Amino acid sequence: MTYQKKQIYVLIITALVALAVFSLYSVSNKLLKTIRAHAYVYGYSLPKNLVVEDVSKLPSAQAVPILTYHGVIAKGVVETNVETNTDRRVFISQMEMLKQKGYETISVEEYELFREGKFILPSKPIIITFDDGRKDSFYTVDKILEKLGFKATIFVATTKANIQEMFYLSWDELAKIKATGRWEIEAHGRRSHDDIQIDETGTLDTYLTSRFYIPGQGLESITGYKKRVAEDYINGIMDLKEHLDIDARYFAIPLNDYGDHEISNYEHAYEFNQALTRQVFKLAFIQAQQRDGLALESFYNDRHSNPYKLKRLEVKNMSPENLLKALDHFSQKNQQK
């Protein structure tokens, strides 16, 4: 065999090996994604002793409490963003309590219609929301919602779906979620959760609230900052339209931060982000103030609440008893207005 033929054979064998490795990687990657997705799935059955209070004689409510969650996980499961997670057993007890007490979930769209005088609230309405677009915001809770007759809204930071990051829902999964009819899918920006360097010492801040620091050049221009941030708002909306045919009208403020914090290196970030939100969305949501897991301010929203500062209670692992106390306390406060 000539040297030239040997080279050809080597090239052919190398190409075949590379093709085999690529094919194996592709198949194994898909299999891993499937296994990981199914690992979140939780089958839920209604407890036989779940008795729902009769609230049919109560008057229509005039305000809606809003709850927010991130990940719902089984105890002992190792995940990122641990501080935002809710134990699945706690979540179930919270949802069952809401069902027993006669709460009825409504959508954000229905709340908007209520604000416009086009929808009558049930006697005990509630909105349940999830932020970021994580797998453990859907697979671990959907059957629970389905069996209890509840619905929810998920706010998606779309870059995670675009790059198919395994911890987050893909566009295919989000399409399946939309098809259930139980979920609203709304905006949370595109790269809004990314950290950026904001000074020469390496200090990090979030994508929407500070100007980039460029080594050797300094801070990006104010014009560049405004263009980048505005594009993130619009790109998040465009992603939802392109992949899911959703015209996003509602926005969860990423990381509960309009830019009004000390670390920001742009003093007008707060005003700029608020102005953008008003330009492109009908409603926007922030977190109610809390301490030690308890609410310090109302998370009830009525017809006249600031549409760009609608309050949500981040529930996490609050006991169902404390959640009920908070609901009852601020419901009474709202009625006294």
Image (cartoon, grey):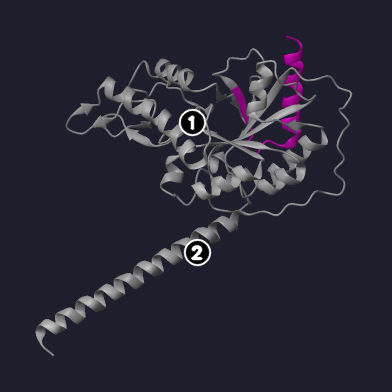
- Horizontal and vertical percent position of residue 245: 52, 38
- Which type of secondary structure does the marked residue at label 1 adopt? helix
- Horizontal and vertical percent position of residue 199: 27, 29
Q: Which residue is mark 2?
A: 31
Residue 94's quadrant in the figure?
Answer: top right
Quarter holding the N terminus? bottom left
Query: Looking at the image, which is closer to me, 229 or 77?
Result: 229
Precedes in sequence: disc 2 or disc 1: 2
- Which type of secondary structure does the marked residue at label 2 adopt? helix
* Residue pictured at 70% horizontal, 23% vertical: 64
- Horizontal and vertical percent position of residue 220: 25, 26
- The amino acid marked with disc number 2 is Leu
- The amino acid marked with disc number 1 is Leu
Q: Which residue is mark 1?
A: 255
Query: How far is disc 2 from disc 1 in space, using C-alphas?
Result: 32 Å
- Horizontal and vertical percent position of residue 6: 15, 84
Residue 120's quadrant in the figure?
Answer: top right
* Residue pictured at 72% horizontal, 26% vertical: 326
Q: Residues within 10 Å of mark 1 (few under 14, many from 20)?
A: some
- Please state if 249 lies on the left or on the right of 301 as rendered: left
* Residue pictured at 66% horizontal, 41% vertical: 181
Number of numbered markers: 2
Is residue 157 at all visible to an observer of this figure? no
* Residue pictured at 63% horizontal, 51% vertical: 74
- Please state if 140 lies on the left or on the right of 227 as rendered: right
Q: Residue furthest bottom?
A: 1
Magenta range is 311-337
